[in-house]
Each structure stands twice: as C-alpha cells, then as structure tokens.
Amino acid sequence: MLKKTLLFVLVVLLLLVCVLFVKTYTTESKQLRTSGERKTFSIRYDALQHLQSAIRIPTVSYDGHINTDTAGFLAVHRLFDSVYPLTTQRLEKTVINSFSLIYRWKGKSSAAKPSILYAHLDVVPIETVNKSEWTHAPFSGDTAEGMVWGRGTLDDKGSAIAMLESTEALLKKGFTPENDIYLVFGHDEEIGGNLGAGEVAKFFLSKGIKTRFNLDEGGMCTSKMVPFVDKPVMLIGTAEKGYMTLNISVKIKGGHSSKPEKETSTGVLVDALQKINAHPFPAQLSPVLADFVDYVGPEMKMPARLLFTNRWLFAPIIIKAYQNVGGEGNAVTRTTSSITILEAGVKDNLIPGEAKAKVNFRILTGQTCVGVLKEIKDVVNDERVVIEVAENSFDPSPITSTSTFGFKTTQAVCGEVFPDVLVSPFLMIGGTDSKHFEKVSESLIRCMPVRMSKEQLRTIHGVNERIGIHDFMEMIAFYEQMMKHL
Ligand SMILES: [Zn+2]
C-alpha cells in the first residue's frame, strides 16, 4: 500500500514538473517584435539650451500658504513663447489659474477623441541640509559628463521641454496630427495638483471634452533593476496607489511631570501607534503586479522564469521575494503605513494635555480610504484616541487595461524609439497628476520615456538630479513619434 502511495506521489510530482516546464517554455512573449538594437539620435543643441534655460528658472512648490513661485512660472511662460514661436502662433493657448498651460493642437479631423500629453512645471525645494552635496548648483542647468544637471531635469521639466521640442519640430515640417492633441503643463503637482491639474481637468469637463489617452510622468526606462532580466525595461504605469493621511490625537489633562497619572496623552498615543505598526496590511499579488509578472516573466532567465510564468502556483513565493526587497518591493504588494509627524509637549517637565500624530497610508488597488480607516479604528480600538482623515486623501486609481489605446500606443512607440527595451505594466507607488483626470480620460498612462540608472532614480527629489543628453534626445524622438500616432 505504502509503495503504491509513494509511486502515486512520484507520478504526480513528475507530472507537475512537466506542466511547469511546458508552461515556462511555451508562455508567449507579450513584447512586440523589434530589431533589438538601440537607436541613436543626433544631438539637437538648441533643444539642449532650451532645457538648460528652463532648469535655470526656479519654479518651486512649497508647502504652506505662499507656495507658488509666481515670477518663476511667468518666466517659464515667456521662455516658451520666445523659443517655441510656431507652437505659440499655431496652437491655441489657455492659461488656467495664472500658471498652468493648455495648448490645443487642432487635428485634421475629430474622428477620434483627443489625447493629452501632460507634464508638470513645478519642482520640489532644495534641502538646506544637503545643498553642499550638489556637484553642480541645483539651478545651474550645467552640462557635464554627458548630462544636464539640475532640479527638474527628470522631474518633470525634461518631459515638458521634450514635448515642446517635438511639437515645434513637427510644425516646422508642416505636420498636422490626425486628431486633436493637447499639451498640458500643470504648476503644482508637487503639492497635490489641485489648483493646476485639478482645475485643468474641470476645464476639460466643463467643455465636454473627453480624451482617449492621457500620458503623464510615471514609470521610466530602468536598467538592471528587474532581476534576471538583461534588457532595460520601460515601466508603463497603469495604476496608482491611493493616498490617505490620518490625524490621530489624544487629549488627557496634563500636569507636572513629577506626579504623572497612570495615563498620559503621549502614552496612549504611543500605544495606538504601536498597534498600527504591529498590523501590516495583507500582502497580495495585485492585478497590476500580476500584469507585470506576465509581461516580464517570459523574458527572464531561469530559475526566475519558471516562477514568473507559473504564478498560478508560485504567487506566494513571488510576493515573498518582493517583500524581501523591502521599501519599494514591499510597497507594490500591500497598503503601507508610515508615521510621518509626531507632535506633543512644550517643556521637559510638563506632561502635555494633547499628543498628535499623522500617519500616511498608501493604499493598494482593491482597497479604499474608508476601508483602511475602519480597519485602523478596529486595530486601535480605544475611545480616547481620535482618528480623522486629513484633506487630500484619495482612493487608488482605476487600472488602465493593457488593451486600451493608451497602453497599446505607448508600447508601439516604445518599440519604434527604444527597440532594445522591454515594456511592462507597472503600479505607481507615488502619486502623479493623473489622478485628476480619471473622469476626463479613457486611459491614463504614467510613463516618462527616459533611460535612468538606479543612481539617477535616487536623485529625483534628492541631490544631483540630472538627465543624460542622449536620453533627452531619445525622449524628444519618443514624443514626436507619439504625436504621429495620435
Ligand atoms: Zn513629478
């Protein structure tokens, strides 16, 4: 009997191994057929100068009341008017809320809905603490080591300038797009985008304009960042995590620290925060991560290929692997929480009457702000702790299907301009202005068509932000090709 059972188990195992290997080697690639060779584009020095000029104008978004670099944005507008004369003459320009710009490029027909190419013009401030670490001053726009240096080169003035360069070049050639194209430049993405992109979206809705495609910043062309894949991968953001901050506070009468009562506001708050920290949200292979696995899996080397092409069996192992990466890897698998602000007390010998904290949540597709709030209230389960949702919270975005015009066109243009690169859907763990356009557009795509090393990726919102000159030329070529598809 035992022998028979053993034999049965062996046969089943053998069958399983066969199924796994068959699936590994027969799962079809989702990539387009391309030459595989990287293309080279000659350097357009005028384009380079325009980027440098834009970088040299600080357009910083600050938190707080006076948060807009008024003079900076107006200077950028003047720069656009002067260096892009054809665009200025032939496209219909609308200024929204003084600083955001809409350019309408009328197409030959209006058979299909228009598309929006989007970038934001504002940048994050320079931190005083690491200002001295910048090799080239943050607003220098210097060129060195084959790069243009400065705040905004990657995030996101590089895209804005590349779009305008493409437009100007195509206008010079007498090109007219098939359908309407809107170039839109927001001015406050780094502080939520309500007054820029938010108002632009309202403008589109008030005019009854719906788009079939919005292309915004997001994933980029990464090298050596996806393990077991040799080729660079263009990450095409098809969804964005939700964002919610909870204001958590405890009020208990304070007093002299020499005679503390059993319970203090600070003590109760710390307990509540510990409970939240000890309660990670469940990890899962969300639909976008599953898409990523399906696009990248067939291109991987063994043994990763075996796992990724058989996620029906190995999903738990894949999730575990992501979590082991920590930080970003963990963030794509679950809703995360971070205690970002703690506030209590004014003097070391005085027990504060109130203690407050802010906890920021990034919510995974499939969950909602309301659901996370309820779960946290249940976890804390303490009447003394007041938990409220802060302003500017939003649910995870809908997922843009890989069968939409937006995704397919982005993939096609990548194939034409970046033939050596793989593409994959991707979950954005950070926010973009795309969230404001959910009611405007049928397909929101978040992708910045630029090659970026791991090191460069860290310079976004950090020190020594810079873009490769050749990479910038590729970006211009990308938008030019994109416009021909629209
Ligand atoms: Zn950005």
Image (cartoon, grey):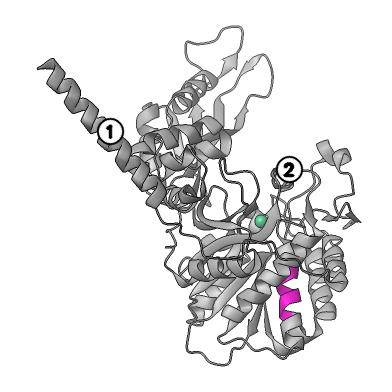
To which residue does mark 1 refer? 14
Q: Tell me the quarter of the image containing the C terminus.
A: bottom right
Crowd band around label 2 with a 10 angstrom C-alpha radius: few (<14), some (14–19), many (20+): few
Q: Is mark 2 within 8 Å of ligand 1?
A: no
Which region is colored magenta? 160-167
Q: CA distance from mark 1 to mark 2?
A: 45 Å
Residue drawn at point x = 55 percent, y = 34 percent: 338
Q: Is residue 240 left or right of residue 138?
A: left
Q: What secondary structure is found at the residue carrying circle 2?
A: helix
67 part of magenta stretch:
no
Crowd band around label 1 with a 10 angstrom C-alpha radius: few (<14), some (14–19), many (20+): few
**Can you tell me which quadrant of the image ligand 1 is in?**
bottom right
- Percent position (x, y) of residue 429? 54, 47
Corner quadrant of residue 52: bottom right
Relative to 217, does residue 92 appear above or below in the rendering? below
Q: Nearer the viewer, residue 417 or 21?
A: 21
Q: Is residue 68 left or right of residue 208?
A: right
Q: Is residue 257 visible?
A: yes
- Percent position (x, y) of residue 196? 63, 66
To which residue does mark 2 refer? 455
Pointer 1 or 2: first along the chain: 1
Q: Is residue 10 left or right of residue 235?
A: left
Corner quadrant of residue 87: bottom right
Q: Amino acid at mark 2?
A: Glu
Q: Amino acid at mark 1?
A: Leu
Q: Nearer the viewer, residue 144 or 246?
A: 144
